[in-house]
Image (cartoon, rainbow, N blue to C red):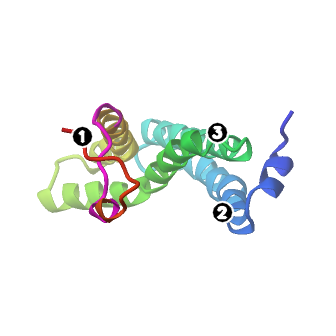
Amino acid sequence: MLTVMTLLVSIGPCSMFQVVVLLLLVLPSSVVMSRHAFGGWPAGLSFLLLSAATASCAIIGVVHARRGRYDRHRPWMLRSYVLICSAVVLRLISGTAGLVGVPSAEAAYVVAAWSSWLLPLAAYEIVERFAKRRPARMSPWALADPQMPALPQ
């Protein structure tokens, strides 16, 4: 059975530092802060679920990396990155709502809290599914290599 320490020791030092900071500092603090969210319990629940989703994606990604399954590691770590970027998206949505002059700032914040991570995550999943269905294309640089296969017709 893999333990957290075994996982962290087996990955590189830079990655280990990032995962430790994420799991031990950022996510627990966001759980505590979710209890005091501006939009009340609906926004707090959004932040709590965001923390759980981010931790889950990071842990699953590390487990796949530890097992050498980098093809499975990459999408999980990209999901984790998309979820971490939700803080920026939250500010963009909240700022836009403030500029537009929505009637209820608290209701707008609750919508922004949920939208800031659900919409980017949904967009990532749609793009990821679409990319898997499209045939792989070679880069222009690969054309110079005679060992590379030809472009699909």
Q: From which residue to which does the magenta span run?
A: 132-142
Please give the name of the residue rendered at 73% of the width and 63% of the height, measured from the top-left corner. 12
Q: Position of residue 46 (x, y in %)?
A: 46, 39
- Which residue is drawn at the image coordinates 24% and 40% (left, top)? 152
* Residue 18 numbered tag: 2
Amino acid type, mark 3: Ile
Label 1 vs 3, first from the N-terminus: 3
Residue assigned mark 3: 60
Of labels 2 and 1, the one closer to you: 1
- Type of residue at label 1? Pro
- Tell which circle, 2 or 1, labels the residue nearer the N-terminal end: 2
- Name the image quarter holding the C terminus: top left
How many residues crowd around disc 2 within 10 Å: few (fewer than 14), some, or many (20 or more)?
few
Q: Nearer the viewer, residue 102 or 15?
A: 15
Residue holding disc 1: 152
Residue 25: image x %, image y %? 69, 59
